[in-house]
Image: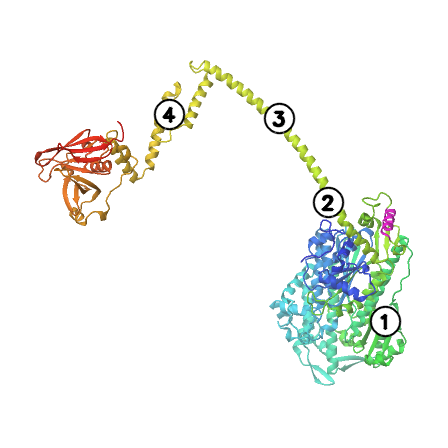
Amino acid sequence: MRCYSTEVMFDGVRAMMESALTARDRVGVQDFVLLENYTSEAAFIENLRKRFKENLIYTYIGSVLVSVNPYKDLEIYTKNHMERYRGVNFYEVSPHIYAVADNSYRSMRTERKDQCILISGESGAGKTEASKKILQYYAVTCPASEHVQTIKDRLLQSNPVLEAFGNAKTLRNDNSSRFGKYMDIQFDFRGAPVGGHIINYLLEKSRVVHQNHGERNFHIFYQLIEGGEEDLLRRLGLERNPQQYQYLVKGNCPKVSSINDRSDWKVVRKALNVIGFNEDEVEELLNIIASVLHLGNVQYGGEESNACITSDTQIKYLARLLGVNGTVLTEALTHKKIIAKGEELMSPLNLEQASSARDALAKAVYGRTFTWLVNKINASLAYTDDSYKHFSVIGLLDIYGFEVFQNNSFEQFCINYCNEKLQQLFIELTLKSEQEEYEAEGITWEPVQYFNNKIICDLVEEKFKGIISILDEECLRPGDASDTTFLEKLEDTVGGHPHFVTHKLADGKTRKVMGRDEFRLLHYAGEVNYNVNGFLDKNNDLLFRNLKEVRLRRINWEDAAATQFKVSLAKLMEILMSKEPSYVRCIKPNDSKQAARFDEVLIRHQVKYLGLMENLRVRRAGFAYRRRYEIFLQRYKSLCPDTWPNWQGKLADGVSTLVKHLGYKPEEYKMGRSKIFIRFPKTLFATEDALETRKHSLATKLQAGWRGYSQKSKYQKLRTSAIAIQAWWRGILARRRAKRRREAANTIRRFIKGFIYRHNERCPENEYFLDYVRYSFLMKLHRNLPKNVLDKSWPTPPAALTEASEHLRKMCMHNMVWSYCKKISPEWKHQMEQKMIASEVFKDKKDNYPQSVPKLFVSTRLNGEDINPKVLQALGSEKMKYAVPVIKYDRKGYKARPRQLLLTGSSAVIVEEGKIKQRINYEALKGISVSSLSDGLFVLHVPSDDNKQKGDVILQSDHVIETLTKIMICADKINSININQGSIQFTVAQGKEGIIDFTPGSELLVAKAKNGHLSVTAPRLNSR
């Protein structure tokens, strides 16, 4: 959770308290002393509401801290927050419980005077939590050692033990303290906690035997039943069911959602070990707790006037657990001892008396056990170092606030009497503190009118005439004393007191709202009616003589309750008067324990009964605001040209100059010896608003000045750095240039000398030159290596590297060839093989060969659908390797006829549509003739004596190079190609010969010449 703060923080932590004034419309003022309308209760509550809405639960009334329970976790109690408040001036940070704790600690250390922190408020207002936070603050921030850490742990662990035995679930609070507690924390000369002491007040013993609906008994009973081990419960004779015990069922609330009894039991057992309880002491303690539960289950029967115990089992458990005789205990619970004329008589008790005696015994046992527990804790916290007997003390008083219920009884009477005494102490100490400060500063003290409640305190505690004395006298006198006779005695004794009223003494209007068994006290916080029923019983412990004589371990019987409380309260007042007090007033915002809900009626009630308006009025009786000169001048000096930016003279003169410039009127302020006192909050608010306005212009000037200074400083640093870098770099460049010149001169000298001796054998004079020549050749070769196998370029080597150059050239070529071949695919390899054959046969021999080089040879020029199926059927299983359309010229007349030339694995087949016209086996192929021109004619020569053949075949193909290459490969007749110039002779059937004449021309022309030859005119594409 976030710690909300309205300060303009310095380093995120420290800022002047008054900076909150600039946000006062939203979050109110953080010190009620600064409220303009300080006499208005509505303005007081509205300021509380504003701060509560913003999660600002703490507000000051001067040095008094007002705390509103937020009913939710706020992240304002971390170690970081503790460090923020550690060693900081009280008003330099926002209000906080840590500020009160630290201020008390620093005052104890610097002034060497004991301190005390008084925490009060209604049940559920957060008193116990406030005391825990203070203890945690000291545990974290104070110096530590091994012994000190042990004490810190015991101080912290005393809380869960005391809460278990002294706290209970009420309608207002699930963990309500049902006793008052004063704890002294003892510090050594180093400021480390070294010991402690606890005093408890007015434990609500009646809760042991009775609880209102929706409430519970003390936590320890439920923790023992829920968390105790099976063996332990068996030994104590207990069952794991709180409904089985009469003292735990009256409130009808065995379980509470916000309480985990099983877990709390483990915490309590661990805490007892830390505090120093041994196993025997823990067992004795639990025996007594269990005996109270068994005592509540003791049942009575018999005649109305002669009660007897009907449950022997409970007596057996009680006798064993308490270490008493069972017969004696039974008699003590059913009879009372009367002494008449020196004789002891045993008189039986009726059922009502016996039940009352049982309950009185249970309350007495538990109350004295609680006192023994506190004493045991004190023994573990005692400061035992004899070498240093003087220690400082900070006291923590966690005590109930003023209580006003629909029905107020003896407990409320004692509580409100305590608060009267505390209010009397507070007013006296506050006025004393104010007067001392005024006198120290040389300012005239103006008497403050306030309600002096000493008259009420005397009414309650005065010897012989006070209410407590009358109550004790009525309890002790012989005869039939009752609550009614006590009320009558009050009317007779203090009936004329202005702050005391009964139904009998009241006027008619008052009688309508008062019962006949009530008396009214006019307290400082208001009127309270007390019902006298039960006063005598609660003041007297109701233990008959024989019950007192039962020897219970670790229990001592004491005087009447009111007298005890009066005596202990007097001692408490002495303790508090000997210390410097600080105050924490706790307020609960609603009865439903809901976060963010602000019940104005409930809070107005608490403001009234906590006396907060009276506190504020006393604090504001003189001057609302006071600050040391140096602090005031430091904050507001910018508002006056004479004090800004610095005042060189005396501080008092500077403050005087400043307030005159601000226009303060004489009645608005006073100048003390070291402080300025401002009477009205509006004067301070006007000053604060002027400062807020001034901040903007100051911020602009400061920003401009800082930016100018920052940029100038940055520029100067950059300039200095640039000059240093430039000088350094120039030096480096100059040294580099000089070095390069020397190296260049040496290189040139060695190069010239080497050139002169270049033809000599290798020697020191020419070795550099020769190495350079070799190096230059190799680098030139590296830059100009051939890019492919066709690139035959190669740099000319020097004489010394001729042989090496040749080796390198061969290696380079071999490497390129190997790399090229490695990249060739099978298909491309086959293509290249065909191209190589074509190159060997036709290169430089046939005109149209160069045009065929860039064109890839295809696997066939005819698709499957171009060849008649009958032909394919006739070929049978023979695989066709190549097919191409050709022109066949007849042997007679040379008529051109379209045909298809098919190449299989064994023969060349000439096809006409669906008929095989001629099959030429490769073995029978004598050769192939072709002209050197660019025509596409070629002649397949076959044997003339083969009857199956009709003579040589004259064919023409548009892809003559490709076709002839395919035939050569298929027939394996690479060397059977004849390239003729001029004419080709071929054989006609019956041994006759024909001639084909080739002549160059402008275009291709094939025709029969007049001489009977076949004349072919073809253009010459290349000159050979």
Quadrant where the N terminus lies?
A: bottom right
Q: With 253 as the anchor, is 189 left or right in this view?
A: right
Q: Are dots 3 and 2 in contact, CB under 8 Å?
A: no
Q: Are dots 4 and 2 in contact, CB under 8 Å?
A: no
Residue marked by disc 2: 703
Residue in the image at 65% along x and 62% along y: 267
- Mark 4 or mark 2, earlier in chain: 2
Looking at the image, is 252 positioned above or below residue 1017?
A: below
Q: Residues within 10 Å of mark 4 (few under 14, many from 20)?
A: some
What amino acid is found at the position of numbered circle 2 in the picture? Answer: Gln
How far apart marks 3 and 1 lie (CA) works out to: 100 Å
Residue marked by disc 4: 794
Element under disc 3 = helix
- Mark 3 or mark 2, earlier in chain: 2
Q: Residues within 10 Å of mark 2 (few under 14, many from 20)?
A: few
Residue 647, disc: none
Residue marked by disc 3: 731
- Mark 3 or mark 1, earlier in chain: 1
What amino acid is found at the position of numbered circle 3 in the picture? Answer: Gly
